[in-house]
Image: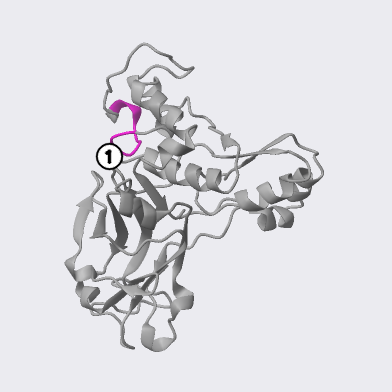
Amino acid sequence: SFYACLELGLDAETWIREGIVDIIAISSGGGWRSENDVSRAVAAAKTSGTLVYVGSGGTYPASPLNGCENGQPAVRRAIALNAYQQGAAGVHLFNHDYGNHRAMPVAPGDESDMPEREYPPIYQNRMGAYASDRFTHKDLQTMRDLGDPERLKRLDRCYHLASRSPLGDYEPQLPRKLCLIGRGASTENALRLQVEDDVEGGLADGRIVKTELRLHLTEHEKSLARIICHVNDQPVDLTAASTIASSQGEEWLVVDNPPVRQGMNTVLVVLEGTESPDGWELQGSGVGEGWPTLHQCELLLRCE
């Protein structure tokens, strides 16, 4: 975030505009994130010719997709395509030689617990004691994909929100306790996700097979009938949602074909009424246990 950087005394936007830097990577101290200032950087670079890249190291936690539970390529594809559509010159990969910064079938933990992966003898990095630290053909294909905007348009993409805010970043939109619609919650409480793709055209010509909404909620079961969900102001029925779970036991509600659109998308998830959720009890001065909490929100474009 250029604004957050200014608070730290770093005027990166001026560095670009005045040509003080030749290349800049719009990144995050915590990982790849969809909220970034690529479009502002590209606008500033019009007078200087500075090359604008997007990228970072690992990715923030997302739902299982395409056999991966960590470093999902679909997350990087979404952020990369957004950046290309906004005028970025390419993608910057940081620490990509670390196995836990790339796609893995389970979340990273003790190296001894990591599953061994099939790999060809392509490259072994400085940490190469484990098969997970060596580049596979799939790893190399992911890198090729990230360099090809037209190919990215035809691959699964996951548009999701970061859940942490390292120094210099945008404030995260999640996690959050669900607000009560009868006590002031409104469309101003909606989450915002940017999708730089012609979704309507892609669905019409078959390039995009379907859209998905995935929500990672906890302590929501007793209140599910009271949860109001709107995608771009259109109601979505969460009581009919299917579920998907990770190996760590985290579960997401999955709704097929929500009305995703090109540009800014809004996702509103709030509680109906004025009463506290069933099962909730105030504990001291805190919120206590039993209040539905939204930890992650994802919009997926399925192309495969």
Q: Residue 295 colored magenta?
A: no
Q: What is the quadrant of residue 71 in the picture?
A: top left
- Which amino acid type is marked by label 1? Asn
Classed neighbour count for the residue bearing mark 1: other residues with Cα under 10 Å, few (<14), some (14–19), many (≥20): few
Q: Position of residue 25 (x, y in %)?
A: 63, 39
Q: Is residue 240 visible?
A: yes
Q: Is residue 291 above or below residue 15?
A: below
- Horizontally, is 105 left or right of 13 in the view? left
Q: Position of residue 267 (x, y in %)?
A: 39, 67
Q: Is residue 50 above or below residue 173?
A: above
Q: What is the quadrant of residue 281 in the picture?
A: bottom left
Q: Nearer the viewer, residue 7 or 73?
A: 73
Q: Which residue ends up furthest to the front in the rendered image?
A: 205
Please tell me whether mark 1 sits on a helix, a strand or a loop: loop
Residue visible at 72% across and 45% down?
Answer: 45
Q: Is residue 168 visible?
A: no
**Residue stretch rendered in magenta on the structure:** 104-112
Q: Principal SS element in the magenta part?
A: loop
Q: Nearer the viewer, residue 155 or 31?
A: 155
Q: Nearer the viewer, residue 82 or 8?
A: 82
Which residue was labeled with disc 1?
Answer: 66
Residue visible at 45% across and 29% down?
Answer: 143
Residue visible at 27% across and 41% down?
Answer: 304
- Quarter holding the N terminus is bottom right
Q: Nearer the viewer, residue 48 or 291?
A: 48
